[in-house]
């Protein structure tokens, strides 16, 4: 058993960390219920001249928190700092009020599924998870039970003879998750854990994360897929270009994103006539006209979707395509970052 | 909820996984061939009627082929990979982010490297000593110097694996340039090279005079152990300070 005390709400030896409100970058902050379990205070990480993470501050407690950001945004670097794998250039990170880089006892209360696909390829799934359990000081019947339960969670119980080197990407991902779960960690840090899983396994994993959260665990999950994050939990941290663009409730973030101006491209044989009609009817706020297309900007996407085709028909135009141009994550982040300035 | 793993337990766990990861068929085959080549060479020298002093010529052959080539190369292949491969393939995190200290990880990797290196060196050098047909002292000297050499070289190469990427290439450079060339220039440089100590052990047991191998048996062993301890301490410090992918 660990001799680490229960997670403190504020480490006695540290200055009081910033409150959740103080880090509400986009004004959608959700107050933390219960003790702070993971916190970053003014964290910056540079590699030479490249700033991977810049002045990030947040606190999370029990529950599922999604770290959302495009590839290369700094999510993995932030996770590595939280786990103590790399020290911040500036600022402090704490897990359960401790520094995982210096204090080995807190490392026993963290479960990490790193993003990389690396495993001990010459071990079987059972051996790999068992090894993870042993390195967390589990032994005897407790170890047997923990290994069986972890493999059961990821549906790999029957994989006892094949070495993980022969596994598919999805199976390897599940082995990593099982190894991260084996010590029943208080803080679970999962870097893109749903990558490579099929839809059924994804659902199962998301249910598992919620079950663990209900048991008071802190689950930090990174993803660059917006829809995935919607199902992971209501608390999100949005990171873009190394900076925290928003933090708080996912639904509020979603509304914020829905309220932003959207750009939509219509391909038509009569772009000028369609563009004029869209403005005249107030369906579009502004338009750009090209030889075979109109790019319209609107805040009411639903109305635009309903009325664009009838307007085209009314004006004798053929509508060949209607494509949203900025529903990708990058544009969402860009909007949040610009809004922040 | 887990606690901390004790020192011995952590050594055992590291040793187990390192041995399992290191011992590949390709590595084993290549190093067996290298050992067989040394034994064949020794047989050729031992059975030749043109050898004037079988002890001296035999010891010189062991020094050259065994302790300049076989022992350092085998130790390099396994020890540099013990933590170096884990670092490069990014599996080191599965040992690093655990409630275990840094020292048992290094000690476990070092012991694992010794356990794997000895079967590829000790039988080949003992067999070579026998095939040289130069008396039991040569066999004993070969065995003792092999054990000391493996212990010291593996410690240095575990450290090297944590210091640089592509440690095998750097290690070959070290073996050829430092151990093979610069250490020949004088007593001071020989003291900073493991070969100076294995050579002293060979020379002191067989009474054969070898250049820069004038230390006593105990001094030879002690010198190699000092290098070993220094390398292990530096490896522990390095593991604690390094950034893990």
Image: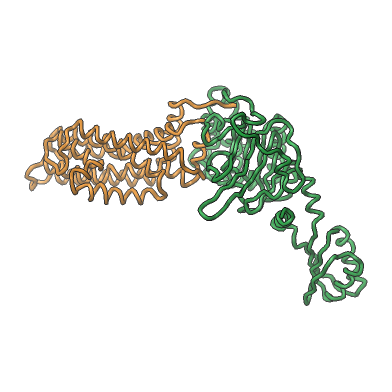
Chain colours: A green, B orange
* The N terminus of chain A lies in quadrant: top right
Q: Position of residue B190 (x, y in %)?
A: 21, 43
User: Quick one: A118 or B29, which is closer to the camera?
Assistant: A118
B14 horizontally vs A99: left or right = left
Q: Position of residue B218 (x, y in %)?
A: 20, 30
Please say whether residue A87 is visible from this viewpoint. Answer: yes
Q: Is residue A338 above or below residue B71?
A: below
Residue, far left: B52
Q: Is residue A5 above or below residue A158?
A: above
User: Quick one: A271 or A72, which is closer to the camera?
Assistant: A72
Q: Is residue A255 above or below residue B55?
A: below
User: Quick one: A243 or A315, which is closer to the camera?
Assistant: A243
Residue, far front: A15
B55 horizontally vs A264: left or right = left
Which quadrant would residue B208 be assigned to in this image? Answer: top left
Q: Position of residue A95 (x, y in %)?
A: 61, 35
Q: Position of residue A308 (x, y in %)?
A: 87, 66
Q: How many marks?
A: 0
Which quadrant would residue A212 be assigned to in this image? Answer: top right
* The C terminus of chain A lies in quadrant: bottom right
User: Quick one: A154 or A216, which is closer to the camera?
Assistant: A216
B224 horizontally vs A140: left or right = left
Which quadrant would residue B145 be assigned to in this image? Answer: top left
Q: Is residue B144 above or below residue A318?
A: above
Which residue is depicted at the point 78% across and 62% down?
A324
A308 horizontally vs B19: left or right = right
Which residue is depicted at the point 15% across and 41% down?
B59
Please say whether residue A158 is visible from this viewpoint. Answer: no
């Amino acid at each position: 058993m660990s001799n680490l005390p229960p997670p403190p709400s504020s480490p006695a030896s540290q200055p009081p960390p910033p409150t959740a409100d103080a880090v509400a970058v986009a004004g959608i902050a959700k107050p933390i219920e219960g003790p702070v379990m993971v916190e970053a205070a003014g964290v910056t990480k540079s590699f030479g001249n490249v700033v991977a993470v810049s002045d990030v501050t947040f606190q999370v407690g029990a529950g599922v928190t999604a770290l959302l950001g495009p590839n290369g945004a700094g999510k993995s670097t932030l996770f590595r700092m939280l786990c103590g794998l790399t020290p911040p250039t500036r600022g402090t990170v704490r897990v359960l009020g401790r520094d995982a880089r210096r204090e080995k006892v807190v490392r026993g209360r963290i479960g990490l599924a790193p993003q990389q696909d690396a495993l001990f390829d010459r071990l079987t799934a059972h051996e790999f998870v068992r090894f993870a359990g042993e390195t967390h000081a589990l032994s005897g019947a407790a170890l047997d039970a923990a290994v069986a339960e972890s493999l059961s969670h990821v549906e790999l119980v029957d994989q006892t003879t094949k070495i993980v080197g022969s596994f598919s990407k999805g199976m390897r991902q599940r082995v990593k998750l099982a190894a991260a779960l084996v010590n029943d960690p208080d803080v679970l840090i999962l870097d893109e854990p749903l990558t490579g899983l099929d839809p059924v396994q994804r659902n199962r994993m998301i249910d598992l994360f919620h079950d663990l959260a209900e048991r008071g665990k802190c689950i930090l999950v990174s993803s660059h897929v917006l829809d995935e994050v919607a199902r992971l939990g209501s608390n999100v941290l949005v990171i873009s270009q190394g900076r925290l663009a928003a933090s708080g409730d996912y639904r509020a973030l979603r509304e914020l994103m829905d309220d932003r101006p959207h750009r939509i491209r219509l391909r038509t044989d009569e772009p000028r006539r369609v563009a004029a009609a869209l403005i005249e009817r107030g369906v579009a706020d502004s338009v750009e006209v090209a030889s075979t297309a109109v790019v319209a900007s609107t805040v009411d996407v639903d109305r635009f979707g309903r009325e664009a085709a009838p307007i085209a028909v009314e004006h004798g135009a053929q509508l060949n395509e209607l494509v949203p141009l900025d529903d990708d994550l990058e544009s969402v982040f860009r909007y949040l970052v610009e809004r922040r300035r | 909820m887990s606690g901390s793993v004790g020192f011995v337990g952590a050594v055992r766990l590291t040793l187990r996984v390192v041995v399992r990861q290191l011992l590949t068929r390709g590595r084993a085959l290549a190093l067996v061939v290298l050992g067989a080549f040394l034994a064949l060479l020794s047989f050729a020298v031992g059975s030749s009627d043109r050898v004037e002093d079988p002890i001296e010529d035999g010891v010189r052959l062991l020094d050259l082929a065994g302790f300049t080539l076989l022992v350092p190369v085998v130790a390099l292949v396994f020890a540099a990979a013990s933590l170096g491969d884990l670092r490069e393939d990014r599996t080191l995190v599965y040992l690093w982010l655990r409630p275990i200290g840094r020292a048992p990880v290094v000690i476990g990797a070092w012991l694992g490297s010794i356990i794997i290196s000895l079967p590829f060196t000790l039988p080949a050098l003992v067999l070579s000593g026998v095939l040289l047909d130069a008396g039991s002292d040569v066999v004993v000297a070969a065995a003792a110097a092999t054990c000391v050499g493996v212990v010291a070289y593996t410690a240095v190469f575990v450290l090297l694996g944590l210091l640089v990427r592509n440690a095998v290439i750097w290690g070959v450079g070290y073996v050829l340039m430092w151990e093979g060339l610069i250490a020949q220039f004088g007593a001071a440089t020989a003291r900073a090279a493991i070969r100076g100590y294995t050579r002293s052990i060979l020379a002191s047991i067989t009474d054969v005079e070898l250049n820069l191998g004038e230390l006593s048996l105990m001094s030879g062993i002690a010198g190699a152990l000092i290098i070993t301890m220094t390398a292990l301490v530096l490896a522990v410090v390095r593991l604690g300070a390094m950034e893990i992918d």
